Amino acid sequence: MQKDVGDNIYVLVIMCTGGIALLVISFVILFIRNQNKLLQQRESLHQVAMDHQKNLLHAVIHSQEEERKRIGQDLHDEVGGSLSNLRMLINRLNNSNVAEYDVPPAEFYKQLIDKIIENVRNISHNLSPPGLELFGFSEALEEMKDVISKGHDSLISITNHATMSTDTLPKHVALALIRVLQELVTNTLKHSLANYIGISLFMKNNLLSIHYTDNGIGYNTEDKRFKKGMGMQNIESRLMLINARYSVKTSAGRGFSMFIYLDPQKDIGPN
């Protein structure tokens, strides 16, 4: 009888030991599987982040190339064309009688020279807004408005309640924000069919907040056909470089809005 009890206890001990061993092995297997799954997820997220960084870098390079192409085209079409016309007029004057002209040739020359000066000024403004260097962000913003609206004051409305903060921004930060707003305005004028653009700047929770809005057609961000274009990628890359956050609010037929947030007191890299 005692032998049977002893045998049963021995069997129970073996069974318990085996059960515990199975549990430990199962736990180890599950742990390894979970670790592998987490590692795969991390690798996937890292790859997504790397792809995103590559896309942003590509957007920056593409934007720079497009800017060079546009400047070259402006110089060729506007400045080059005006200089060619001026040369033709000078040659014509040399081969004709001044009395044949109803308007003195000097007046034509003056008009062409004025046009060349205006074209060069517009190109230089696009390259580096002079108001930003001389008077700060607020003046550069007003300059941008004047150049784009071309006398149509109702097109763009600017409300700046953060002048003290914007005008003390580091130059590279201010220039990046001007470029972002220029890109947003360009997108609006090209694609949205809007006739009104609003830009508001204010301080909220120690952050410089910029609200850009238009009354255009907007778009549906959930539409699978929607794809972030180079313009938006360029905007995102510029904001990333100055540690600014942003959010977009838009829907089909209800315009477009972007909210940009930036800590003006934070050290945002070198000038």
Image (spheres, grey):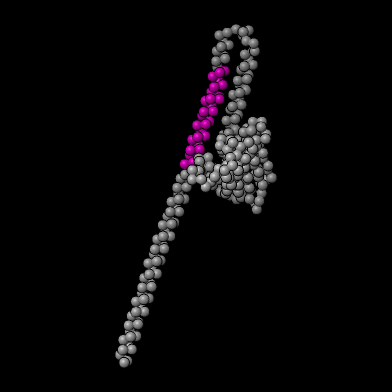
Predominant secondary structure in magenta?
helix
**How many circles with numbers are drawn on the protein?**
0
* Picture layout, residue 53 above or below residue 153: below
Q: Is residue 268 visible?
A: no
From the viewer's side, name the closer residue of 69 and 10: 10
**Quadrant (top left, top right, bottom left, bottom right) of the N terminus:** bottom left
Q: Is residue 71 magenta?
A: yes
From the viewer's side, name the closer residue of 118 and 25: 25
The range drawn in magenta is: 57-86
Q: Is residue 197 visible?
A: yes
Q: Quadrant of residue 41?
A: bottom left
On the rendered structure, is 65 left or right of 212?
left
From the viewer's side, name the closer residue of 250 and 237: 250
Residue at 63% from the left image edge and 7% from the top image edge: 99
Residue at 56% from the left image edge and 11% from the top image edge: 92
From the viewer's side, name the closer residue of 155 and 88: 155
The x and y percentages for residue 52 are 47, 47
Point out the residue furthest to the bottom here: 1
**Quadrant (top left, top right, bottom left, bottom right) of the C terminus:** top right
* Picture layout, residue 77 above or below residue 12: above
The x and y percentages for residue 211 are 63, 45
The x and y percentages for residue 116 are 59, 24
The x and y percentages for residue 20 are 37, 76
* Picture layout, residue 217 above or below residue 48: above
Q: Is residue 79 magenta?
A: yes
Residue at 56% from the left image edge and 35% from the top image edge: 190
Residue at 49% from the left image edge and 43% from the top image edge: 225
